[in-house]
Image: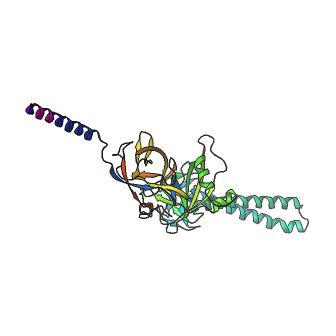
Amino acid sequence: MKKRFFISSLILSIGLVSCNQKKEDKAAPVAMPYKVVAVTKSNTSLLAEYPATLEGVTDIDIRAKVDGYIEKIYVQEGQEVKKGQLLFKLETQTADQEASAAKAKVAAAQVEVNRLKPLVERNIISDVQLETAKANLASAKSTYQSIIARINYATIKSPVNGIVGTLPLRLGSYVSSQTTEPLTRISDVSTIYAYFSMNEKQQLDITLNAAGKSFQQKIAQMPAVNLILSNGIEYAQKGKIETFSGQANTQTGSFNVRASFSNANKLLRSGGSGTIQIPTNLSDVILIPQNATLEMQDKRIALTIDKENKVKAVPVEVRAVPGGQFFVVDKGLNVNDKILIEGVGIVAEGTLIKPELVDYATIINPVKKGIN
């Protein structure tokens, strides 16, 4: 009897232990600690980038005004020249002969006028003959001056200070005023203009954030812009936006914009390219680390912590801050929302965590680039 009681007690004990073990297996998992931060507002600057083409203050095509063969070339490609400096000389042998003949006709016409003057004064002949002689003299002088002008046009000088472009034609090439290709191009690059375009929304974002009441005041008070050269290096001189086109292009919906850059060392040349960076200063905006978000399909997601310390995925609309470490959050988060900054991409939505609150200032302050 005692043996049966002992066995029954043993079985009951084993059953209780088994039930307790199952209850322990079904108990809630332990919440793991993860770092979170309560978001607040800060100030920053964003950089909008636009591809640009570079041109000098003036880019003048040098063309021949008269026909002739290139006899001399006095400059080299890329050479810096002054206004009035000799560039080309065309062959003028035929024109020189014509000038000599025209000069002789002028002299002959002058002799005729001189011969007739005393005869008219003594009333030997009528003044009609003298007037005819004077007209012939004027015609001869005009012909001579025209030929001399043609000879002068054969000596081609630079109309401005600038840099010589390519020289597509060589010695002996025949040119005329109808030649399609210019002899060269002279570019005044003391100041470089960067031409680029932006859409209507970008134009409004920039101008609405600029100080000033009128459109011209806003342009005048816009912050300086950067020029990133084609090799990725930032140009040392800051630029200034000078003009917006008066209306949007009806086909593209874009505005043409011009910024100017000082180019005293002549580093920049016409025909080059680069990227314009326009800063937009923002005040009282929410900043979060980029690594506190993840991308799912076409959406950017931040992980917030609710009152029960459970993770919740929230879609956010963001803009990147220069430096690649922060986002400006336009939509999706509010001040004092707690977001996960550790384990993003690992912790699943709905997971219970043990939040470890990190001071927002320690997240923002170490990174100064792009922060005002």
Up/down of 23 relative to 307, above or below: above
The colour scheme of the drawn protein is: rainbow
Residue at the right extreme of this rendering: 123
Locate residue 192: give its quadrant: bottom right
**Residue 254 location in percent, x, y?**
59, 46
Q: Does residue 46 belong to the magenta stretch? A: no
Q: How many marks?
A: 0
**Which is the main secondary structure of the residues drawn in magenta?**
helix
Question: In the rendered view, does 324 fall on the left or right side of 97?
Answer: left
Magenta span contains residue 9: yes
Left or right of 6? Residue 198 is right
Kindly tell me whether residue 222 is visible in this rendering.
yes
Where residue 149 appears, as percent x and y from the top left, is 65, 60
Quadrant of the rendering where the N terminus is positioned: top left
Can residue 270 be seen in this snapshot? no
For residue 20, side relative to residue 233 (left or right): left
Which residue range is magenta in the image? 3-10
Residue 23, given in percent of the width and then of the height, sits at 27, 38
| Residue 346 position in % (x across, y down) | 33, 46
Residue sitting nearer the eye, 148 or 102: 148
Towards the viewer: 126 or 52: 52
Residue in view at x 65 percent, y 59 percent: 218
Please tell me which residue lies in front, 183 or 307: 307
Residue toward you, 367 or 323: 367
Q: Which residue is drawn at the image coordinates 85% and 69% (left, top)?
A: 118
Left or right of 123? Residue 270 is: left
Q: Quadrant of residue 85?
A: bottom right
